Amino acid sequence: MRSFETRGPVYPEDNYIVARTDELTDFIGRLEKGRYVVLFAPRQTGKTTFFHRALEALPHDNARIILGMLADYETPSLNSRRNSKV
């Protein structure tokens, strides 16, 4: 029985997913044209799953892909900057 996953990897055979076929086609088209692509979205919205699906769909011959993930990035608050300049 499939379920909604709220943490960790999502597998179509076990979990409900949104296919995002239009977004995936657009993403791959941009990569094939040599474009720089950034995927920015809130936590738990399927970014990693999207990247995995894109990697599966891309041709593997001479492909150069750099996948960088920014995890737990925190912007210092203005108050902490003001207090540190005392």
Image (cartoon, rainbow, N blue to C red):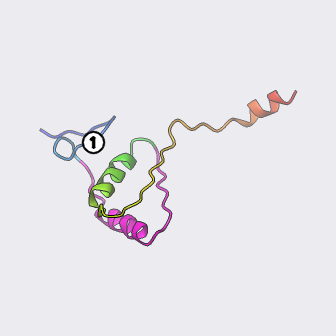
Q: Residues within 10 Å of mark 1 (few under 14, many from 20)?
A: some
Residue drawn at the location 49% of the way across and 52% of the way down = 40
Residue drawn at the location 39% of the way across and 69% of the way down = 32
Q: Of 34 and 8, which appears nearest the observer?
A: 34
Count of numbered tags:
1
Q: Is residue 67 magenta?
A: no
Q: Is residue 9 above or below residue 17?
A: above
Residue drawn at the location 20% of the way across and 39% of the way down = 3
In terms of secondary structure, where does tag 1 sit?
loop
* Res. 75 image quadrant: top right
Residue drawn at the location 33% of the way across and 48% of the way down = 49
Residue numbers of the magenta segment: 17-42
> Which residue ends up furthest to the bottom in the rendered image?
33
* Res. 28 image quadrant: bottom left
Q: Position of residue 37 (x, y in %)?
A: 48, 61
Q: Position of residue 79 (x, y in %)?
A: 75, 32
Q: Position of residue 53 (x, y in %)?
A: 29, 54
Quadrant where the N terminus is found in the figure: top left
> Which residue ends up furthest to the left in the rendered image?
1
Going by the image, does 2 lie left or right of 50?
left
> Which residue ends up furthest to the front in the rendered image?
62
Quadrant where the C terminus is found in the figure: top right
Q: Is residue 25 above or below residue 65?
A: below
Q: Amino acid at mark 1?
A: Val
Q: Is residue 37 magenta?
A: yes
Going by the image, does 2 lie left or right of 35?
left
Q: Which residue is mark 1?
A: 10
Q: Of 17 and 31, which appears nearest the observer?
A: 31
